[in-house]
Amino acid sequence: MDKRSLTERDICTKFILPAVKRAGWDEMVQVREEVYFTKGRIIVRGKLVTRGKAKKADFVLYYKPNIPIALIEAKDNSHSVGDGMQQALDYAETLKIPFVFSSNGDGFVFHDRTGASTPRESNLGLDAFPSPADLWERFRAWKGLDGESEEIVLQDYHDDGSGKEPRYYQVNAVNAAIEAIAKGQDRVLLVMATGTGKTYTAFQIIWRLWKSRRWNPESNKRVLFLADRNVLIDQTMVNDFRPFGAAMAKLSTNAKTIERQDGTSVDLTVALDRKRRIDTAFEVYLGLYQAITGPEERQKLFKEFSKDFFDLIVIDECHRGSAAEDSAWREILTHFSGATQIGLTATPKETEYVSNTDYFGEPVFTYSLKQGISDGFLAPYKVIKFHIDRDVEGYRPEKGQLDRDGNEVEDRIYNAKDFDRTLVLDDRTLLTAKKITAFLKESGDRYQKTIVFCVDQEHAARMRQALINENADLVAENGRYVMRITGSDKEGQDQLGNFIDPESKWPVLVTTSRLLSTGVDAQTCRLIVLDREIGSMTEFKQIVGRGTRVHEDTRKFYFTLIDFRGATAHFADPDFDGDPVQIYAPGVDERMTPPDEEAATPEDEVEPTPGEDETIVDQPELPTPPGDPVRKIYVDGVGARIIAERVEYLDENGKLVTESLRDFTKNALRKRFASLDEFLKRWKSAERKQAIVEELEAEGLALDAIADELGKNLDPFDLICHVAFDAKPLTRRERAEYVKKRDAFTKYGPQARAVLDALLEKYRDEGVLNLDDANVLKVTPFTDMGSVVQLINAFGGKAGFEKAVHELQDALYQETA
């Protein structure tokens, strides 16, 4: 056997896997091959949506399921034994794996990321691969685990038998929390972006601790899960926390029938009777913190539990002031100060007055919005920025200007902070509604779920009215096309479930103030509109998070954020970690959609991959501050208009640059091919021309979009030559005609010439690049010429056929301007 002729996969099967098995690794339980751990970044540019290449580890070795400790990167034998090491180290950093190997089938290079080995990197023979016991002993020493903490760390994950597995970052989060708790840390903070499955992660942590006999052997291991959204509690009980079964109850007096994700229904078990007496027989309690505490002593139900009743408390969305000294959250946490407490948040809060890290300590694990978008688990987004003249220039009433009630308007300069809060310019509201509607019409989808964030509930009511008038045709189709959903609007709140249900068409456009800013799992939300200032980075991230879920069934791969108030200035804040893919500021008479964007079609989008559904949650309206409500001044007839225009894209370094799709493509191609000669050399040497196109597509440079912009019927070769190097392009028809003029097929017999002529026609009409694929002979007109075997034999066999087609392709690209 010539080892150098073997593929990388052959090397894995014939040399690496046998070496691993000889070292004592269980192939069925401890060894996984070709482990894809990201989805591939969703790349959006103009109307084009593609996925980048997903990351894949050749081998991951687990001491137990979901406890990875080693990674092997394989190369074929034409590479040296250590050629895969740098790539392997990059993957190991992401997967939090300490022991890293590279191999070409001759042996291994071993890198110990713990730093305990001397030297840190060494060469091993094929028969010297470490055993599971050897690597686990090194792992234990690295983590500082004793016998008791080791038993906690090795506690099994929950497996429901469905094949569902936690994503790599969820494994990292769960293992980091368990390791910290096993070593005695009793305050743990996990930071995970909205839409990344914090509740499922929390379940796996709780499950492993709950099942661990050594975590707290003297108690029944009672757990309290706290949240501030009632729907979150209910959906958590019937979905992610369902395996706790009869050991679980809700701290509520009202039983409720809830529908599970699989469509079945279940009645929630409650731990309170009508007199609010607590049943202490359960082990896992879920509670709405508002239901167990309050400003009055009689409302502080949590005090009915002894201080040491709970061993573990998990606080969901702990950024909402949970660590503030005077918050209701902190009061509960202080009462149960002896319990291990885990905080979950998408946006840790760090202000002069509130600090999560001051209470919980530094996060033991962080998975950011930026990382989620980069991995392809979260949807990226575009931003359309509007600068309204009144916001930019301010508004000063004319002398003697009267408001709608006939009162004189105070003479001062009003600005964006005043509009819709103390001063109402209805023309501004109407302009905003017109622009939202124009976007929906130009996008080609007026049924995309949309949330419009307004200054307050009254502003949300006026915005609802303006949108109804702008969309009267669809409102006539169904009165729920536009609805206000706020804390004071029961009819609107009753429709919240329909809005977040992907199966429900109505309502479509929702106006709100704060009700939907956090927690609501609107999986199919494609448009978020900001018509109020967002002062808090925490709230801004939460609002962006309303749209970050990828939804495969409706082919939702990105969303759009329309900003009327300059809230997207937060992008410039170093604390923001998930930049938009595009920012566009239309001018006065400009289209609403960015210049390169049309309505997305299925052909433009790659096939989706399933994502994990998130729990649907709700949020009550924030309480109105005490005192008399502010009287708003309504001024009519002032007018408002849009000013300014800018189109920006993110470059490969995450910086916003101003350029068109064509400029972007040109710069990206020139970075890949330094000159026209270099590209021509690469193209002519490639047996499969399509392989070059596929490589470009994997980097987000699919050429169909630029071809559509140019409006020319060019094949990829001419597109690249023309866009990147300003060469005069030839159409496919022109290239085909040049080949015919040369009469290049005279050396072949009649049947072979007929096949080549038909292949040339196929290229001219369809732009087929992989002409040497024999499958092309299975369709018309080739089926009329003879069988595939007969046609290939006309060239003297398969090798002759492939040689002839490669000559045809060389002839096609011989004419280059």
Image: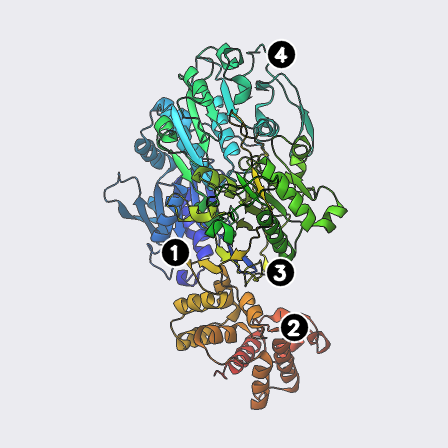
Amino acid on which the number 3 mark rests in the picture: Glu
Q: Which residue is mark 2?
A: 777
Q: Quadrant of residue 589?
A: bottom right
Q: Residues within 10 Å of mark 3 (few under 14, many from 20)?
A: few
Left or right: where does residue 265 sit relative to residue 243?
right
Where disc 1 sits, the SS reads loop
Q: Quadrant of residue 766?
A: bottom right
Q: Is residue 343 visible?
A: yes
What number of labels is visible? 4
Residue nearest the viewer, comparing 329 with 118: 329
Q: Which mark is residue 603?
A: 3
Task: Answer with mark 3 or mark 1, whichever residue precedes in sequence.
Answer: 3
What is the spatial separation of the Cα atoms under label 2 and label 1, in whole angstroms? 45 Å
Where disc 2 sits, the SS reads helix
Task: Answer with mark 3 or mark 4, whichever residue precedes in sequence.
Answer: 4
Question: Where in the figure is residue 338, as x and y percent of width and height?
Answer: 40, 16
Q: Which dot, 3 or 2, sits closer to the camera?
A: 3
Q: Is residue 136 above or below residue 665?
A: above
Q: Which dot, 3 or 1, sits closer to the camera?
A: 1
Q: Which residue is mark 1?
A: 653
What is the spatial separation of the Cα atoms under label 3 and label 4, in whole angstroms? 57 Å
Q: Residues within 10 Å of mark 2 (few under 14, many from 20)?
A: many
Amino acid on which the number 4 mark rests in the picture: Asp
In contact (CB < 8 Å): disc 2 and disc 1: no
Where disc 3 sits, the SS reads helix
